[in-house]
Image (tube, rainbow, N blue to C red):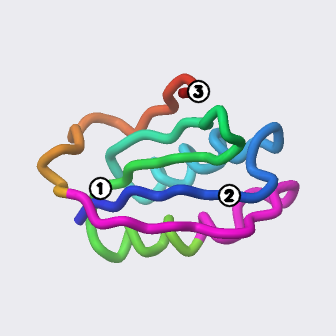
Amino acid sequence: MAKHLIITGIVQGVGYRASFMYQARAQHLSGWVRNRFNGSVEAIVSGDAQAVQAIIDWAWRGPSSAQVSDVVVIDVDDALVSDEEFEMRATE
């Protein structure tokens, strides 16, 4: 199962990306996370359905200093996601 997440709110400058990466790795997910120039955070996650749902649930909370206002979840083809370790990408 693979999902594309777009997280908005106060999610940059608060450790959101690093925390997201830590949570994704703890769930043994593949994919990536990055900041967007528009102030949002974007991620692609792939793995077991229960683990993917767990990271989506976490995305709504984020680290304690974040204030998440929305998490848009879009289905993607899991064949498009690398099976390598979850990574943090540069802002785009």
Residue behind mark 1:
46
Residue farthest to the right? 65
Residue depicted at x 50% and y 69%: 56
Residue depicted at x 70% and y 47%: 16
Dot placed on the residue nearer the N-terminal end, 1 or 2:
2
Residue depicted at x 29% and y 55%: 46
Dot placed on the residue nearer the N-terminal end, 2 or 3:
2
In what quadrant of the picture does the C terminus appear?
A: top right
Q: Are marks 2 and 3 in contact (CB under 8 Å)?
A: no
Residue farthest to the front? 38
Which one is in front in this view, the residue at disc 3 or the one at disc 1?
3
Q: Is residue 62 located in the magenta-colored stretch of the structure?
A: yes
Which amino acid, by three-letter code, is at mark 3?
A: Thr
* Nearest to the observer: residue 38 or residue 59: 38
Start-end of magenta stretch? 58-76
Q: Determine crowd level at label 1: few under 14, some 14-19, many 20+ residues with C-alpha closer than 10 A.
A: many
Residue behind mark 3:
91
Using the numbered discs, state the Cα–Cα distance from disc 3 to disc 1 in whole angstroms: 20 Å
